[in-house]
Image: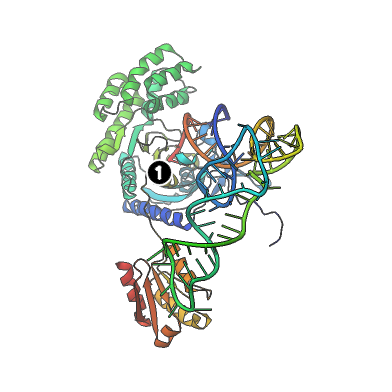
Amino acid sequence: MSEKKKIQPRIFKGTQDFLPEEMLKKQYLIDKIRAVFMRFGFEPAETPAFEYHEILMGKYGEEGEKLIYPLAYKGGRTLALRYDLTVPLARMTAMHPELPMPFKRYQIQPVWRAEKAQIRQGRFREFYQCDVDTVGTDSLLADAEIIAMTDHCLRALGIENFLTKFSSRKLLYGIARHYGATDETLGEFTRVIDKVDKIGPDAVVNALLDSKNLNQRTLIDTCIEFMVMASDRKKDTKTKLEYLEKTFGKQPEIFAGIAEVRQISAALKSLGVDEARWVFDPALARGLAYYTGPVFETVLPDHPHIGSLAGGGRYDDLIGLYAGRRVPAVGTTIGIDRIITAMTQLGLMPDTGTSTDVLVCLFDEDCAPAALVAAAKLRDAGLNVMNWFEPTKLKKQFNYADKRGIRVVAVLGPDEVARGEITLKDMTTGEQQNVPAPDAADAVKKILDR
RNA sequence: GUGGGCGUAGCUCAGUCGGUUAGAGCGCCUGGUUGUGGUCCAGGAGGCCGAGGGUUCGAAUCCCUUCGCUCACCCCA
């Protein structure tokens, strides 16, 4: 080695390396989610990591757009790393009018956001999204299916104490307008109201009073009642809807929102989703600009510092921006990296161990051919097998197997080679056996099964 | 974007009213055991104390600057 100063090994804040031990767990979880997606008739798709800048701009709202990573590119063209998988889906769908509708696809790929990372909250600058969407239907059965599927996914991962909140964006928007909010103040109003669950009605009132745009005494006074109702988890969906109907029902937008919530609730019951794990929350806003109707978000109520595990909604106008005709769609995103954060903190991460079944030791150079032949035969039998490459002490080779958690070690020394045998050792029990070489695969499988 | 906390070995940290050669545990390497791991025993490697400047006879310790990490808020997956 030269004496030059080394380059400091480091990674960009908010990005992460996954060592094999962690990657095996992540893959295990993704496999579970993928299986649920396919169970509901969704199929995989992928899109590029970057898109033309104008494809992404103007879709997420002011807050989101600031977080898009732009990429300079020659010729004056500008690209950007994708911010989510929904907008690329919309673009892709518009490019393929031949797709049979409804188009049901899932997509599991990384996205990038120029946020301040917050590891304990599971917030990263690069993270995987497991996105599922149903394109081409107005039916709210699709929305309910998405919520039900999210429920299945999280339970398949072994998570139980989650809660999916849902509403229709039409409700909060309609209510805001009812209270005198304008197009300019709508966003701020809904964002403040959305916090009611976390900070309580009184704090929301203070926030409204502090705001330059929203500080209208009459507006705030009449809206307290709504917030108290909205933040009350004990009130059931029926009671909440009746209140909204009685108070705001004449507004066509609110009337439509109420109908959406009613239909989705009914479908969720039919789909058998446990009512302890979903709730109608009329204060739910959601930040992304493209949502037009139902919105949903899954959280861990007992661990509010961890952000939402999943979130989505209906976006009936987004694809039309690219297609030039109306194409309704609904979908959600499950944040697998955030789920890993949550499961780790809750002690729910499964121990997946190693994927390697057998280490075939190298006794000395003369025995190398026999070791290679033995490994090849074990692989033919469907086992995951690695060879040791250097004629080091067996102690070192066994030590390696132990550290990797490899269950079976195979030794082929001069004695075994002469007799046409292989010595197999079960590293968990320490038991050893000599078997004829052709029987080795079956013997290994027997060890793995016990 | 706003506001706190922290940077000492690969990891977790101790040490700081300024005072010789900077420590522990874990991990790593070697040997005890030339055909056998996890335990045990013995030994070893590994640190310009985040970086730069200042004060001082003397700085890991005090001051300034800077970089990095982290927590909370915001927003989200």
Question: Which quadrant is the N terminus of chain A positioned in?
Answer: bottom right
Where does the image place residue A230, in percent across and percent down from the top left? 33, 25
Where does the image place residue A440, in percent across and percent down from the top left? 36, 78
How is the rendered protein coloured? rainbow
* Of residues A376 and A293, the one drawn nearer to the viewer in this rendering: A376
Which type of secondary structure does the marked residue at label 1 adopt?
helix
Looking at the picture, does residue A284 appear above or below residue B45? above
Instruction: Tell me which amino acid carries mark 1.
Output: Gln
Residue A130 lies left or right of residue A447; in this view the side is: right
Residue B77, located in which quarter of the rendered image?
top left
Residue at 32%, 70% in the rendered image: A447
* Of residues A211 and B67, the one drawn nearer to the viewer in this rendering: B67
Looking at the picture, does residue A197 appear above or below residue A162? above
Residue at 53%, 81% in the rendered image: A365
Q: Chain of mark 1?
A: A
Residue at the bottom extreme of this rendering: A418
Kindly identify which residue carries mark 1: A345
Residue A210 lies left or right of residue A346; in this view the side is: right
* Of residues B40 and A225, the one drawn nearer to the viewer in this rendering: B40
Where does the image place residue B59, in percent across and percent down from the top left? 69, 40
Residue at 40%, 22% in the rendered image: A176
Residue A289 appears in the figure: no
Within 10 Å of the Cα at label 1, are there few (<14), some (14-19), or many (20+) other Cα atoms?
Answer: few
Residue at the top extreme of this rendering: A217
Residue A11 appears in the figure: yes
* Of residues A436 and A177, the one drawn nearer to the viewer in this rendering: A436
Question: Which quadrant is the C terminus of chain A positioned in?
Answer: bottom left
The number of numbered discs placed on residues in the rendered structure image is: 1
Looking at the picture, does residue B76 appear above or below residue A432? above
Where does the image place residue A190, in percent across and percent down from the top left? 43, 25
